[in-house]
């Protein structure tokens, strides 16, 4: 069950957007913050609070990669492997991180600290290769820089 704080946060969102439908994306962020990922119950809560059909919420949550469909680690490492990043060793960066963490893409470390994902373009092509860890971008990645970043995540 969604907390009262989260429900109020979603209701507040409706005061800042022109239509209920345009509230779906920010409301899903509230769900993700609340549960750590997008649950089916959370999607139904969003639909109920916004007064939209559940399918509208399901469509949005399944289309965008920034909504986690299952639990992720404390740090969600998302490496861009789209064209600009791939041309500048994005796939290699994935391998470096995979080796360092001892997990494959779509896996979480046993201590639940890291989840590794690959994602499509994050809009930072000019600083490729890049990755996003939770809400922060890390750009112009190299092997050494990745090592330093991961070691700095406590
Ligand atoms: S291709 Fe990686 S940020 Fe655009």
Image (spheres, rainbow, N blue to C red):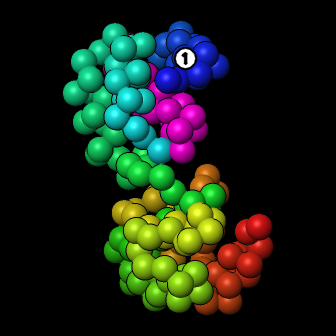
Q: Image height check: is 74 above or below 19?
A: below
**10 Å neighbourhood of mark 1: few (<14), some, or many (≥20)?**
some
Query: Could you tell me residue 105's position as x and y percent?
Result: 41, 74
Q: Image height check: is 64 above or below 55?
A: below
Residue at 41% x, 84% y is 91
Look at the image and give the residue range highlighted in magenta: 19-36
Q: Secondary structure at mark 1?
A: helix
Residue at 48% x, 52% y is 71
Determine if residue 90 is in view.
no
SS assignment for the magenta stretch, majority: helix
**Residue 29 sits inside the magenta stretch:** yes
Q: Quadrant of residue 127?
A: bottom right
- The one of 115 and 28 positioned closer to us in this rendering: 115
Q: Where, quadrant-wise, is the C terminus in this rendering?
A: bottom right
In the picture of the structure, the residue carrying the numbered disc 1 is 7
Q: Image height check: is 94 above or below 134?
A: below
Query: Could you tell me residue 88's position as x and y percent?
Result: 46, 84
Q: Image height check: is 73 above or below 48?
A: below
Q: Would residue 76 be found to the left or right of residue 105 on screen?
A: right
Indicate yes or no: mark 1 CB to ligand 1 under 8 Å: no
Query: Could you tell me residue 32's position as x and y percent?
Result: 51, 39
Query: Could you tell me residue 3's position as x and y percent?
Result: 59, 22
Residue at 68% x, 84% y is 147
Q: Quadrant of residue 28?
A: top left
Determine if residue 112 is in view.
yes
Residue at 22% x, 27% y is 55
Q: Would residue 46 be found to the left or right of residue 59 on screen?
A: right
């Amino acid at each position: 069950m969604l907390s009262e704080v989260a429900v109020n946060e979603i209701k507040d969102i409706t005061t800042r957007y022109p239509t209920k439908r345009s509230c779906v994306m920010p409301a899903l962020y509230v769900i993700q913050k609340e549960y750590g990922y997008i649950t089916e119950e959370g999607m139904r809560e969003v639909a109920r609070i916004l007064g939209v059909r559940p399918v509208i919420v399901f469509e949005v949550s399944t289309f965008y990669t920034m909504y986690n469909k299952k639990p992720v680690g404390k740090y969600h490492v998302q490496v861009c492997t789209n064209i600009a990043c791939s041309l500048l060793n994005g796939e290699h960066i994935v391998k470096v991180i995979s080796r360092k963490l001892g997990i494959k893409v779509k896996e979480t470390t046993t201590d639940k600290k890291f989840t590794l994902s690959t994602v499509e373009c994050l809009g930072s092509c000019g600083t490729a290769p890049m990755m996003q860890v939770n809400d922060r971008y890390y750009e112009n990645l190299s092997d050494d820089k990745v090592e330093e970043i991961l070691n700095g995540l406590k």
